[in-house]
Image (spheres, rainbow, N blue to C red):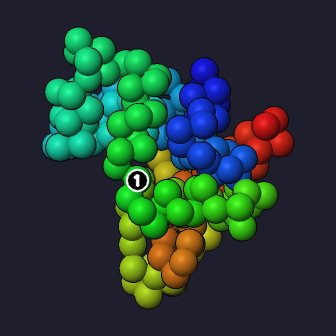
Amino acid sequence: EVQQGLSAAKFKFTAGGIAGIMGNMEAESQMDVAMTENVKGGVDGGLCSWHGSRAKKLRDNAPKGDWKNVGYQLDFMYSELGPELKGILTNKEYADNPKYCAGAFCAIFERPMNYNAEKFATLPEYISLSDRSGSVKKSRFVLNVYDGRYYLDLQRRIDAALFYYGRY
């Protein structure tokens, strides 16, 4: 349903643009339009895991209070994109580049844990995490670089975009 909605003529997204958006939605909500998550400072929700004032606006502006509607959330997302990102996601130059589109959508729209590259350039590739049982395991660090900055889970977003692009 999400892919069909993003393919609508009104958006004019390229195949790479659609895949890039979907890769980010997969990382944010597992494509669950009704996803909600309590986080510090409020409740995240929806396909793009909107937070704070953006989540409030999503809910408050929904027709008949139905913010869990795929079409409404896609229209809401589109209204927030801005000219730079709209240009990338609709540009034929990037039509076959879901990796670039996923990175651009992550960096410009989602902005998850945007870190200064200099500050994090010396981080180890693996970090130690403890699970609920208290045992410590090694885990690949989840920050990836796009345009000189680090973003949370960028590689997972790109991998998902490539998967969706292959299905498109």
Up the image or down, 111 lies above or below 55; here it is: below
Quadrant where the N terminus is found in the figure: top right
Q: Residues within 10 Å of mark 1 (few under 14, many from 20)?
A: some
Q: Quadrant of residue 91?
A: bottom right
On the picture, is 69 further left or further right than 144?
A: left
Q: Position of residue 99 (x, y in %)?
A: 69, 60
Q: Please report the residue visible at 41 percent of the width from the left and 18 percent of the height from the top.
A: 69
Up the image or down, 87 lies above or below 37; here it is: below
| Outermost bottom residue | 118
Q: Please report the residue visible at 39 percent of the width from the left and 26 percent of the height from the top.
A: 72
Q: Does the rendering let one see residue 154?
A: no
Q: Does the rendering let one see residue 12?
A: yes
Q: Please report the residue visible at 54 percent of the width from the left and 42 percent of the height from the top.
A: 11
Q: Position of residue 102 (x, y in %)?
A: 60, 56
Q: Quadrant of residue 94?
A: bottom right
| Outermost front residue | 10
Up the image or down, 133 lies above or below 81; here it is: above
Q: Which residue is mark 1?
A: 81
On the picture, is 44 further left or further right than 145?
A: left
Going by the numbered disc 1, the residue's amino acid type is Leu
Residue 2 vs residue 30, the one in the foreground: 2
